[in-house]
Image (cartoon, helix red, strand yellow):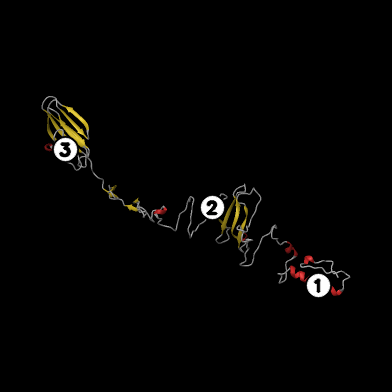
Amino acid sequence: MALETATYIDGLNASNPAASDAISTADDHLRLIKSTIKATFPNITGPVTATQAVLNAALQDTGDTMTGPLVVSTAGAAVTLQTPTATDLDGVTLRFKNTDTSIALNQGYGGIEWESSDTSNNGVRGYIKGVSEGTTGQLGISIATQGSGASAPVEAVRVANNGNATFAQNVTVSGNLTVSGTVGISSGTITGITDIAVADGGTGRSTLTAKNLVVGNGTSAVNFIAPGTNGQVLTSNGTDWVAAAVPVNGLGVGQTWQDVNASRASGTTYTNNTGKPITVLVGGTAQSGSPTVTIVVGGVTIATNSFPYGTIPFTFIVPDSTTYSVTFGPGTGKQYWSELR
């Protein structure tokens, strides 16, 4: 009797049983067929309805290519890409490949789309896809969504091939946002925040009072100086800036002519400590010969005059906190000395 040994159906011998085998051995062959079928399909617990075409088109573990769409229609179902082993840190990559190096601008490289039952725009409601940025295979990433209605999805984010990201729609950040580079804002407004702290480059104020001057206040919010009355100017009081009247300290303002002849002597140095410039008027009288009068202000001789006869007036200005003296030479007498102070 010819009875092979087999575990799976590929071990069965189609030539068995031989025509000369006794009919009493048929049960042995039937049991072998049944055991190999059950061993080959251990997880089949119901009817298998797929056609031979479907079974023949099933993807292998590696190397096969799917040419049609992968559709998961059951609610809540998902396609899971699982890392084969715990030591494989890279995981599994879902890859979209285009070998053409001359892709037109914005032509897609493939991606992921979200669809609805709406037939407009093929039901597409959003996508993440690779897009070309030129004709040399430079690839960017485009993310688009659609809020409502039948309009096509609108691109919200474009990540260029150099890594720069452009946001075409609103961006909401509920947590912390750290930026290590430069933030450029070409237009629009920033809303939702007020009173940016001074330490963060702000003023600490939500509004700036109209026509007021802004004054720094350390790390605290800036202060303001309001306009004073007509004609006032900004001046320092030694501690703060204040609006005050224009100080009037000109020559002759608040000064009077005073006769100081009795308290002044020839050749003696005096100091103007009035806080303002003063005007000095002296008169010398020729008594004999050719007398001279010498005037020194701040250590500088500003005049040495000779006169043959009579009384000659001399006038000069002495700045504040400056020394001055008048020396009458031989043959000269001091006639008068007055000061505007």
Image depth: mark 3 or mark 1 in front? 1
* Sequence-wise first label, 2 or 1: 1
In the rendered structure, which amino acid carries the disc numbered 1? Answer: Leu
Q: Residue at x 19, y 28 (%)?
A: 304
Q: CA distance from mark 2 to mark 1?
A: 69 Å
Image depth: mark 2 or mark 1 in front? 1
Q: Within 10 angstroms of label 3, few (less than 14), some, or many (20 or more) residues? A: some
Looking at the picture, does residue 205 appear above or below residue 284?
below
In the rendered structure, which amino acid carries the disc numbered 2? Answer: Ala
Q: Quadrant of the N terminus?
A: bottom right
Q: Which residue is mark 1?
A: 30
In the rendered structure, which amino acid carries the disc numbered 3? Answer: Glu
* Sequence-wise first label, 3 or 1: 1
Q: Within 10 angstroms of label 1, few (less than 14), some, or many (20 or more) residues? A: few
Q: Tags 2 and 1 in contact by the CB under 8 Å rule? A: no
Between 311 and 261, the residue placed more toward the observer is 261
Q: Quick check: can you spot residue 129?
A: yes
Q: CA distance from mark 3 to mark 1?
A: 146 Å
Relative placement, left or right, of 330 versus 77 is left
Q: In the rendered image, which quarter is residue 279 located in?
A: top left
Q: Residue at x 40, y 54 (%)?
A: 199
At mark 2, the secondary structure is: strand
**Residue 310 place in picture, x, y as percent:** 12, 28
**Residue 68 place in picture, x, y as percent:** 68, 59
* Sequence-wise first label, 3 or 2: 2
Q: Residue at x 16, y 38 (%)?
A: 339
At mark 3, the secondary structure is: strand
Residue 165 numbered tag = 2
Looking at the picture, does residue 273 appear above or below residue 61?
above
Relative placement, left or right, of 105 versus 328 is right
At mark 1, the secondary structure is: helix
Residue 53 numbered tag = none
